[in-house]
């Protein structure tokens, strides 16, 4: 079922899914994908789960779409009790396995820490977090001003987010400091 890695650098991994409720009696379970397109999971070959502060490779027997859900089964788990004992684990992939993105695109984890500069050249702060409250993604910016307030900037490409420059670690925005 799993092969242990001796030393793990968690910064090399990204959370891609979470094991959910069991399905049926043969060890199947629902898999909740955190990818923008849940079917992206099918393109990855290796998956990992954190267990006792070690990253262990997880070998899926199958992953398949079932209506709006993804149903999966781990090779060595064959009944509902074993599936429940495995628990609601987080599933990771190596960041190096992520597909290359187009110019002016970035993954959420790459946005964190980037500096935000508006069209007037003002430095508004750094991305502290990326959230989604339902309507669209939102950048939470740790402001550089003396008031130490946070800004929320909607992640709307070509309207608010003008460009993303990974080499400069910056995002150009059409946004004002006092919005």
Image (cartoon, grey):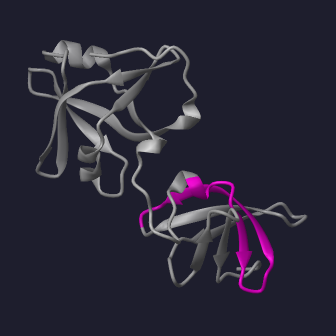
Residue 153 at x, y = what percent?
A: 61, 71
Residue 98 at x, y = what percent?
A: 41, 49
Quarter of image, res 28: top left
**Left of 66 or right of it: where is 56?**
right
Q: Is residue 113 magenta?
A: yes
Observer-nearest of 99 and 149? 99
| Magenta extent | 110-134
Q: Is residue 153 magenta?
A: no
Give the quarter of the figure containing the C terminus.
bottom right
Give the quarter of the figure containing the N terminus.
top left
**Left of 64 or right of it: where is 43?**
right
Looking at the image, which residue is at 8% across and 21% down?
25
Residue furthest out toward the right: 146
Looking at the image, which residue is at 19% across and 13% down?
81
Residue 49 at x, y = what percent?
A: 40, 26
Observer-nearest of 179 and 7? 7
Looking at the image, which residue is at 83% across and 60% down?
148
Residue furthest out toward the left: 25
**Left of 177 or right of it: where is 25?**
left
**Left of 157 or right of it: where is 149?**
right
Observer-nearest of 77 and 84? 77
Decide: is 98 above or below 79. below
Looking at the image, which residue is at 36% across and 15% down?
3
Residue 68 at x, y = what percent?
A: 17, 52
Decide: is 121 above or below 55. below
Decide: is 53 above or below 163. above
């Amino acid at each position: 079922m799993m092969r242990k890695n001796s030393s793990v650098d968690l910064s090399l991994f990204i959370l891609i899914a979470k094991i959910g409720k069991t399905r049926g009696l043969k060890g199947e379970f629902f898999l909740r994908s955190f990818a923008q397109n849940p079917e992206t999971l099918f393109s990855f070959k290796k998956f990992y789960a954190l267990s006792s502060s070690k990253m262990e490779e997880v070998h899926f027997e199958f992953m398949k779409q079932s209506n709006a859900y993804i149903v999966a089964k781990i090779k060595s788990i064959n009944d509902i009790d074993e599936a429940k004992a495995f628990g609601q684990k987080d599933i990771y992939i190596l960041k190096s396995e992520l597909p290359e993105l187009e110019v002016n695109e970035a993954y959420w984890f790459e946005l964190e820490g980037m500096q935000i500069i508006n069209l007037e050249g003002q430095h508004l702060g750094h991305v502290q977090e990326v959230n989604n409250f339902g309507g669209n993604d939102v950048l939470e910016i740790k402001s550089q001003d003396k008031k130490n307030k946070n800004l929320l900037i909607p992640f709307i490409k070509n309207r608010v987010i003008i460009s993303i420059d990974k080499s400069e670690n910056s995002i150009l925005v059409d946004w004002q400091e006092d919005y």
